[in-house]
Amino acid sequence: MSAPSAAHAPRASASEAPLIAMHGVNKWFGSLHVLRDVDLDVSRGEVVVVVGPSGSGKSTLCRVINRLEPIDSGDIHVDGRPLPVEGRALARLRAEVGMVFQQFNLFAHMSVLDNVTLGPVKVRGVPREQARRRARELLGRVGIADQADKMPARLSGGQQQRAAIARALAMDPKVLLFDEPTSALDPEMINEVLDVMTALAGEGMTMVVVTHEMGFARRAADRVVFMADGQLLEQAPPAEFFDHPRTDRARDFLSKVL
Ligand code: ADP
Ligand code: MG
């Protein structure tokens, strides 16, 4: 793993602190306790892959980090600051903590290029022409420069997801969260998305990735986190987790997915 690039090099005093720090985080949906005393630190440049059965709270874990969902107790810091609740600070947080969803979530009524340009212009105040140049560059980086002027619906699922990654990157995020980014894709398109993610990981992007792609986890993760029933039951380097899971829950899970 290479060091984080200068582009997201933090203030010297903050560089030792984790980029994401979650302590004692609890979240309920009504009477359903979906995050139970979650402690999770993510360092700069680290790739954390979150695995676990359906319904264990993986999406919620992602969504509380950029405050798409509020938490009920505990605290979350991103880059040394507590999560903002509203206003410009919240918009800035959402720019710093990029998110890539299973369903791509591109704006259907605007071109791929406009999808990637919108955030930097509206939230970051980047001049339009500059944002468009950067967007073309990023679309090239994810291998779909030739799709820039099309509407999202004209793209394959794999191309749409790569456009969504370019859109997230356009905000110069400090960290990217991926929530099952390949689960909605036809099998032949999964690798083109995983390859882009693997390249980002290699370039030092800080990433939290929820996925069922265990090959990707082995290859790209610095650490695998196993979640069940709202708890982080195991955290280990991939070789250790896959070869020597410690809990029955993890062994049972792995016997089904491997
Ligand atoms: P995972 O991503 O691991 O499948 P989720 O975080 O999506 O798990 O969901 C955890 C639990 O919380 C599930 O039981 C799910 O049904 C429930 N849940 C998720 N979102 C909501 C919501 N907005 N309202 C009520 N229950 C929810
Ligand atoms: Mg989920």
Image (tube, rainbow, N blue to C red):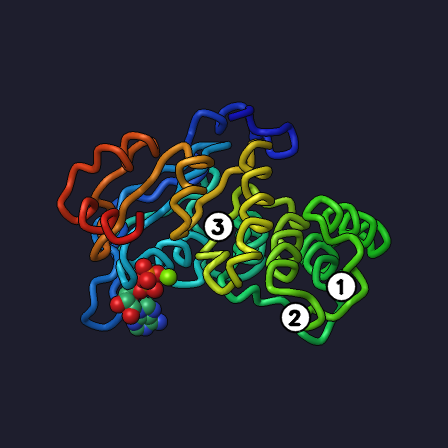
Residue at image position (43%, 51%) is 83
Q: Badge 2, how many Cα within 10 Å: few under 14, some, many 20+?
A: some
Q: Identify the amino acid type marked 3.
A: Leu
Q: Badge 1, how many Cα within 10 Å: few under 14, some, many 20+?
A: some
- 107 displayed left or right of 233: right
Name the one closer to the observer, 89 or 202.
202
Name the one closer to the observer, 46 or 102.
102
Q: Position of residue 187 (x, y in %)?
A: 51, 58
Some atom of ligand 2 lies within 8 Å of the CB belonging to the residue at label 2: no
Q: Quadrant of ligand 1?
A: bottom left
Camera sees residue 70: no
Labels 2 and 1: the sequence-earlier one: 2
- Give the residue pinned by disc 2: 107
Q: Position of residue 90 (x, y in %)?
A: 52, 57
Circles 2 and 1: CB distance less than 8 Å?
Answer: yes
- Give the residue pinned by disc 3: 177
Q: Farthest residue to the bottom: give it.
A: 109
Label drawn at residue 36: none
Labels 3 and 1: the sequence-earlier one: 1
Residue at image position (46%, 33%) is 46
Query: Considering only vertical position in the picture, is 194 above or below 1?
Result: below
Query: Considering only vertical position in the picture, is 214 above or below 29?
Result: above
Residue at image position (45%, 56%) is 179
SS for callout 1: helix
- 90 displayed left or right of 21: right
- Give the residue pinned by disc 1: 114
SS for callout 3: strand
Residue at mark 3 to residue at mark 2: CA–CA distance: 19 Å
Residue at mark 2 to residue at mark 1: CA–CA distance: 9 Å
